[in-house]
Image: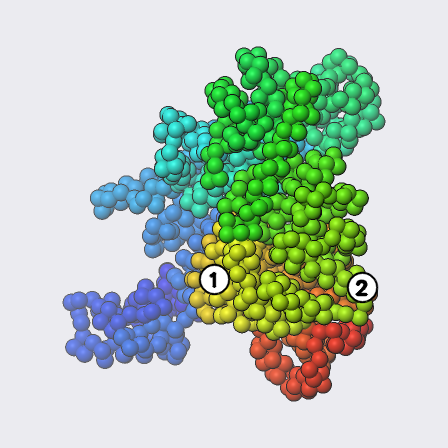
């Protein structure tokens, strides 16, 4: 509420202030702002230069005294250099007018802002006020009125000061001109209605108002381009550019294509020869051209060059202030600024309506049975393009006949709207024309090379076609049927997908499919053997690069040979890819193939030369089965017993012995002996390689049983015993493992030391998930030390690969960001990030996980962290739903019929419930502290700063004095399993008395 007014007459609490000099003092103090003014300045403002009193300080004191009498004794405060108003901004009209007017304008509440800004412009104009006023006038009265006001302002500057408006205001002027003459490039002006997509259009348009980059995501034929066109037509930005990328055949051409569409200089000339430096220059000029005026840039059909689009979008979003980017793609860009809108298929009603409209347009008298139309729409999966192509067939066919002929839908669904892009019609005639220009040798090469889904190298082409393949490849490149792509992993040749499908069709027609695939599989087996032989060696980096270059092709061939029961090739490929995925931290991919590979091995007898590879495959599969709950272990163990575990390779022999020990423990075939007992035998082995691997797994086992201190000791011993002969990865992973263990203990300095050792190797190997977790630990340590800028810099280095990777990195990185926000005092933002993490972790199923999916470790851990932070920092109802969810899960988490128990994760849940109960007084204090102690004894992770044990101890002593020490003494030395029944009892008690928390 305003107390002091000076904008019109000077009043205090609505009453006029008497005395000219008193009023002058108050106005001068208001003009000086909250910092106040010096005595000399105030004297000059009150008396002027020509009427200074004989004793200025004494005279000023008299005026100040009168002003205090007229206002309030505490209204004017003495400062070391003079005086200041001791009032809040809201109490002074001149102080509150400016922020209020600017705030309303920033919130786009233009009608409310306009009178305030007009008055402020009259009383105290400056550049910021003028900018806000121009935008407000444009919103309320239109761009012409704002342009007229700008001209008045510009003329006033020229006449009064002889200067021009600042660059900032000239940019506003340019924006107003653009709004007065909007730009729309690349848009189609179709008159038809977009059926069934109004809600989608509204949702995407709303997302574009709050996000810098939005991707309409979905498979081909869904109508992503049509939807983007509608949204672009309705966009509120004065400038809209729609750029089609379907013709861009290589990522390197993206910047040139966009620059060309926008009319950027030098984008077109010699486009195919632009150097990286030239591309960077064109990219910068694209940003410059888009800057200044609010612009919507639509990049259509991005999936074939998605990485390049992501890079450009990230650069433009960071560089251009008022730019919004809309992309359409079959895969997300996976950049931090992106929000994804998954475009769904048309429902039966909308799909049927689309079919009817297109069919009636093709033949108005066609009989359209509603049931048959719905059947066609359902069989076509609600894809708009397929529905339209089917509907136009009523020109010559009945709906019933169209439905019957959908058995061969690709032959049927040809042609359509002649104005549609070529890619939405048949391309057979166009490709056939090019095909007929080739020699037989070149046609055979096109047929045989079409089996490569992810392009190929010259060496691969020679393996399939013969050593004289180079001449043929050069001819196909010249004919533009192959494109040449260079990357850090080497030079590759690619076909357009349509061309490749045409080649596949001709390959089958020629009866050469089996021969071509056999040649490709022979190449793949030899390629995999060569890389696999080096992956556990000092050439590990090179071997990983070799496999990464052909990963997609090799995985595709592996799927084919599994489907064809071709065991020998499958084993050779899985040996290489399985180890590659394990080193890269992509364990899900190994586990996903456990079923089909296990089926293949169940009754297959490997030849002698493949025994070692078969054993390695079994070791990988056994590990995956063990960590996902034991499903499939008996079958795999039986195969290993039949094949034999006495491997020649020392490291493989170690792996098999450890896997057998894990399998016996998980399946109960080692009755009476714990996993630790099994590993103890291996630890006593005279071979240091055996002992190193045994200590590695013992470290994992101890951590899982709630003994992080013992896990650290085992990990340190494993690191001491591990040499470099197996490549840099084993030691790097031990450093990463120790980093996580020290973080779990809250010893972040030691955790950071080990993370620094691991990061260079993990980055070089492309182990993105493990790398992200190590980076998160470094960031957390920096936050804990108060080095916020360092933490922000670490998180800024995190790549999209880590954020889009596995649950470990994704959760850890976002949790580190939340910790930084909380430490900076940005509590609502930090808690919101933790809530998003908890939600996203629930959407990350792990293949092969045999336990209750509601209890997956990463989900429970994320929810527990969010509950603890909400208990510490939140207010109101913040976090109550997550607490209720944990309460509901708690009985199942400690149930005696669980297949396996992850004690640290269960400990996090117990700790979170205890922390919430203690801070929010939702549980009895005795039970709350008991839950905290049980969480500690279960080895809960302290890697998140809010979960530090010393903080919990302080809270317990403050809110329930003496209880924690008493419970600690009661439990003695018991930990983990020894306290599981106690945990069950406490959970039963608090959930039984806390039913209201679950509602």
Q: Quadrant of the C terminus?
A: bottom right
Give the residue at mark 1: 756
Earlier in the chain: of badge 1 and badge 2, it is 2
Q: Nearer the viewer, residue 211 or 798?
A: 798
Displayed quadrant of residue 663? bottom right
Residue sitting at x 81%, y 67%:
671
Give the residue at mark 2: 668
Displayed quadrant of residue 405? top right
In this view of the protein, can residue 137 be seen by the observer? no
- Badge 2: few (under 14), some or many (20 or more) residues near its Cα, within 10 Å? few
Q: Nearer the viewer, residue 94 or 311?
A: 311
Q: Position of residue 304 (x, y in %)?
A: 55, 33
Element at label 2: loop
Q: Which mark is residue 929?
A: none
Residue sitting at x 48%, y 29%:
484
Q: Which numbered mark, 1 or 2, is in the foreground of this view?
A: 2
Separation of residues labelled 1 and 2 (CA atoms): 40 Å
Q: Position of residue 206 (x, y in %)?
A: 58, 43
Element at label 1: helix
């Amino acid at each position: 509420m305003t107390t002091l007014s000076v904008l019109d007459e000077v009043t205090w609490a609505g009453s006029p202030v008497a005395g000219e000099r008193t009023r002058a003092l108050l106005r001068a103090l208001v003009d000086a702002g909250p910092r106040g003014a010096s005595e000399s300045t105030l004297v000059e403002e009150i008396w002027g230069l020509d009427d200074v009193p004989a004793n200025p300080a004494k005279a000023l004191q008299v005026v100040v005294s009168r002003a205090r009498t007229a206002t309030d004794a505490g209204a004017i405060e003495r400062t070391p250099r003079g005086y200041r108003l001791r009032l809040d901004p809201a109490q002074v009209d001149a102080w509150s007018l400016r922020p209020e007017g600017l705030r309303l304008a920033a919130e786009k509440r233009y009608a409310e802002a306009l009178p305030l800004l007009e008055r402020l412009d009259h009383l105290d104009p400056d550049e910021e006020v003028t900018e806000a006023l121009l935008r407000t006038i444009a919103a309320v009265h239109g761009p012409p009125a704002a342009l007229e006001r700008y001209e008045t302002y510009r003329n006033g500057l020229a006449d009064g000061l002889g200067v021009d408006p600042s660059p900032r205001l000239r940019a506003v002027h340019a924006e107003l001109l653009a709004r007065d003459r909007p730009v729309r490039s690349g848009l189609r002006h179709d008159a038809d209605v977009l059926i069934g997509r109004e809600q989608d259009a509204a949702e995407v348009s709303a997302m574009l108002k709050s996000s810098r980059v939005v991707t309409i995501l979905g498979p081909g034929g869904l109508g992503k381009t049509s939807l983007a066109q509608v949204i672009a037509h309705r966009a509120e930005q004065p400038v809209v550019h729609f750029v089609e990328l379907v013709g861009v055949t290589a990522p390197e051409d993206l910047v040139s294509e966009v620059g060309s569409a926008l009319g950027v200089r030098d984008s077109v000339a010699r486009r195919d020869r632009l150097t990286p430096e030239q591309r960077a220059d064109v990219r910068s000029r694209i940003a410059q051209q888009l800057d200044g005026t609010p612009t919507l840039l639509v990049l259509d059909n991005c999936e074939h060059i998605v990485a390049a689009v992501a890079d450009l979008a990230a650069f433009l979003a960071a560089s251009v202030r008022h730019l919004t980017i809309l992309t359409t793609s079959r895969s997300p860009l996976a950049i931090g600024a992106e929000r994804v809108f998954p475009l769904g298929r048309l429902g039966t009603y909308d799909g049927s309506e689309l079919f009817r409209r297109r069919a009636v347009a093709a033949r108005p008298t066609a009989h359209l049975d509603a049931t048959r139309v719905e059947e066609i729409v359902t069989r076509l999966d609600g894809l708009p393009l397929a529905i339209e192509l089917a509907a136009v067939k009523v020109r010559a066919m009945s709906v019933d006949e169209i439905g019957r002929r959908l058995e061969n839908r690709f032959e049927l669904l040809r042609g359509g709207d002649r104005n549609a892009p070529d890619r939405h019609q048949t391309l057979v005639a166009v490709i056939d024309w090019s095909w007929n220009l080739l020699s037989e040798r070149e046609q055979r090469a096109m047929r045989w090379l079409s089996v490569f889904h992810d392009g190929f190298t010259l060496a691969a082409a020679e393996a399939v076609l013969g050593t004289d393949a180079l001449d043929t490849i050069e001819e196909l490149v010249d004919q533009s049927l192959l494109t040449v792509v260079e990357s850090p992993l080497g030079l590759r040749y690619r076909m357009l997908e349509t061309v490749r499908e045409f080649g596949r069709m001709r390959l089958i027609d020629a009866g050469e499919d089996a021969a071509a695939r056999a040649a490709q599989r022979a190449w793949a087996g030899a390629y995999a053997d060569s890389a696999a032989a080096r992956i556990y060696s000092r050439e590990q980096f090179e071997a990983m690069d070799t496999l990464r270059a052909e990963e997609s092709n090799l995985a595709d061939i592996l799927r084919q040979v599994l489907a064809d029961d071709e065991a020998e090739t499958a084993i050779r490929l899985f040996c290489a890819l399985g180890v590659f995925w394990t080193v890269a931290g992509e364990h899900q991919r190994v586990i996903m193939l456990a079923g089909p590979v296990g089926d293949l091995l169940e009754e297959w007898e490997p030849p002698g030369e493949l025994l070692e590879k078969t054993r390695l495959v079994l070791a990988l599969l056994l590990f995956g089965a063990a960590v996902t709950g034991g499903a499939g272990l008996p079958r795999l163990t039986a195969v290993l017993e039949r094949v034999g575990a006495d491997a020649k390779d020392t490291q493989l022999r170690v792996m098999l012995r450890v896997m057998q020990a894990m399998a016996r423990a998980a399946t109960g075939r080692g009755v009476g002996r714990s996993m630790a007992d099994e590993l103890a035998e291996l630890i006593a082995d005279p071979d240091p390689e055996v002992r190193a691997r045994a200590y590695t797994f013992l470290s994992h086992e101890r951590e899982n049983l709630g003994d992080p201190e013992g896990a650290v000791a085992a990990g340190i011993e494993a690191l001491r015993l591990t040499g470099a002969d197996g490549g840099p990865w084993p030691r790097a992973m031990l450093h990463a493992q120790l980093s996580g263990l020290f973080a779990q203990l809250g010893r972040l300095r030691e955790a950071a030391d080990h993370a620094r050792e691991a990061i260079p190797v993990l980055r070089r190997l492309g182990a993105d998930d493990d790398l992200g977790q190590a980076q998160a630990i470094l960031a957390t340590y920096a936050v804990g030390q108060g080095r916020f800028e360092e933490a922000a810099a670490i998180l800024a280095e995190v790549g999209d690969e880590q954020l889009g990777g596995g649950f470990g990195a994704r959760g850890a990185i976002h949790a580190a960001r939340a910790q930084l926000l909380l430490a900076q005092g940005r509590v609502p933002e930090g808690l919101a990030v933790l809530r998003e993490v908890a939600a996203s972790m629930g959407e990350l199923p792990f293949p092969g996980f045999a336990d209750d999916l509601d209890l997956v470790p990463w989900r429970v851990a994320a929810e527990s962290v969010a509950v603890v932070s909400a208990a510490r920092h939140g207010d109101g109802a913040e976090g109550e739903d997550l607490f209720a969810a944990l309460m509901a899960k708690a009985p199942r988490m400690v149930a005696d019929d669980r297949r396996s128990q992850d004690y640290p994760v269960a400990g996090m849940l117990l700790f979170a419930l205890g922390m919430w109960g203690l801070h929010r007084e939702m549980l009895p204090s005795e039970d709350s502290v008991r839950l905290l102690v049980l969480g500690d004894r279960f080895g809960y992770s302290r890697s998140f700063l809010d979960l530090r044990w010393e903080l919990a101890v302080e809270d317990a002593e403050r809110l329930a004095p003496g209880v924690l020490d008493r419970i600690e003494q009661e439990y003695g030395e018991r930990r983990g399993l020894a306290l599981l029944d106690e945990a069950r009892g406490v959970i039963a008690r608090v959930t039984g008395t806390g039913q209201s928390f679950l509602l």
